[in-house]
Image: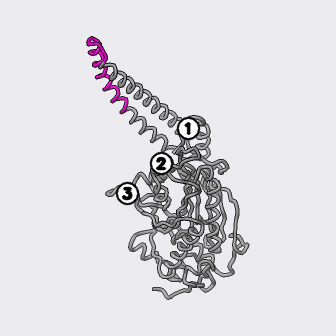
Amino acid sequence: MIDLRLLRDNPDVLRASQRLRGESDSVVDDLLSADESRRSAVQRFEALRAEQKTLGKQIPKAAPDEKTALLARTKDLAAEVKAAEAAVGEAEVELKRAQFAIPNLVEDGAPAGGEDDYVVLREVAPDGRIGVDRDPGFPIKDHLELGETLGAIDMERGAKVSGSRFYYLTGVGALLELALLQMAISQSVDYGFTPMITPVLVKPESMEGTGFLGAHASEIYRLEADDLYLVGTSEVPLAAYHMNEILDLDGPKRYAGWSTCFRREAGSYGKDTRGIIRVHQFDKVEMFSYCRPEDAHEEHLRLLAWEEQMLAKCELPYRVIDTAAGDLGTSAARKFDCEAWVPSQGAYRELTSTSNCTTFQARRLNVRYRDSDGKTAPVATLNGTLATTRWIVAILENHQQADGSVLVPKALQPFLGGREVLEPVAKR
């Protein structure tokens, strides 16, 4: 939610941000109008209430010939106060609607443009060979062929039981995911995060507060009978964890949430229909941080560094991109993605993203801290992926061998019982 003081003092900054996102800046004028209407409604209500209180004090002291007129005015005034109070309520609803129509202010330095206008910050490879230079010297298998050979992925039965974009992770596939997520949790704990198993069903105010019920509402599963939503990321329950609270923030307050995630993938018909790259259900470890607004930029870079550390542990070639403003989510002011090389596609695909949401979510969720003067102010919130099911795609494809086996990255081996190689198995 946009800071109204910023709106009043510098609306042109918000207009420029909207244009950078490729969106209309008319919503800024709508918000200015709604803000002025609410302030006028409040002023009228307060003036009538003040008059009402003054009359209340005058009536007992009034002369008999004056009291009749005062009582008549009191009766009329009561109706006016009631109407003015209702007008304030309506103005506040309209103000909230106008505020929720504007996405977060884009951070200075974010690239302009849309989905394809990202900036590549760096390409990294454990052996020095970046994606396009990697040639294993034998025919490449994709992750699904490898997964089926290893007895790790069963798409056919997933579709039989649940429909398209569902799957089973079986045998070493299940063990590999658990090992990967456990390694992510272990790393997060090493850096002072509090591990959490979060709810996957949340109330509408939690989903709306994090910014997922606007442009992205079609992506979300809703249980209408219970008025609950299935989360697409544990960012939602982690952001709402301190809703309506005042935090003590000597330093960042960090959580690592492990959850199953659900996404409808509306609008992705025909995209990534093979394998587990784009699915309706997956597991993820998500980093989440609450910090003072002035510390948010550096905290964002720390989250990115921890994501890159996980990629290095998995010995994956990857690149880091600075996402263009038009491809940012509603809540994000800046976002960096890490994309791993997928040999079968000859392309980089997203494995992690980390977003600085500044005070946008905290204003919606009413999460505050006390500053050095003892005054309360909204915190900044940030999030970042540490591991997810999709990582299995990159691990299988980048570490495959000519015989269909897959080498386990050294850092991951202790979490897989010391296993160094995943071997093909007889088809079940």
* Mark 3 / mark 2, whichever is N-terminal: 3
Q: Residue at x 61, y 40 (%)?
A: 13
* Mark 1 / mark 2, whichever is N-terminal: 1
Label 3: element kind: strand
Whole-angstrom CA distance, mark 3 to mark 2, is 20 Å
Q: Give the residues in magenta.
A: 61-86
- Magenta segment, principal secondary structure? helix
Which residue carries the number 3 mark? 228
Outermost residue, top direction?
65
Q: Quadrant of residue 61?
A: top left
Percent from the top left, x then y, of residue 174?
A: 49, 78
Q: Residue at x 42, y 76 (%)?
A: 157
Q: Does 43 appear in magenta?
A: no
Which residue carries the number 1 mark? 5
Which amino acid, mark 2?
Asn
Q: Residue at x 56, y 39 (%)?
A: 25
Percent from the top left, x then y, of residue 69?
A: 29, 15
Whole-angstrom CA distance, mark 1 to mark 2, is 16 Å
Compare residues 13 and 56 and report the one nearer the observer.
56
Outermost residue, right direction?
128
Q: How many marks?
A: 3
Which amino acid, mark 3?
Leu
Compare residues 335 and 179 and report the one nearer the observer.
179
Q: Are marks 1 and 2 in contact (CB under 8 Å)?
A: no
Q: Which mark is residue 366?
A: 2
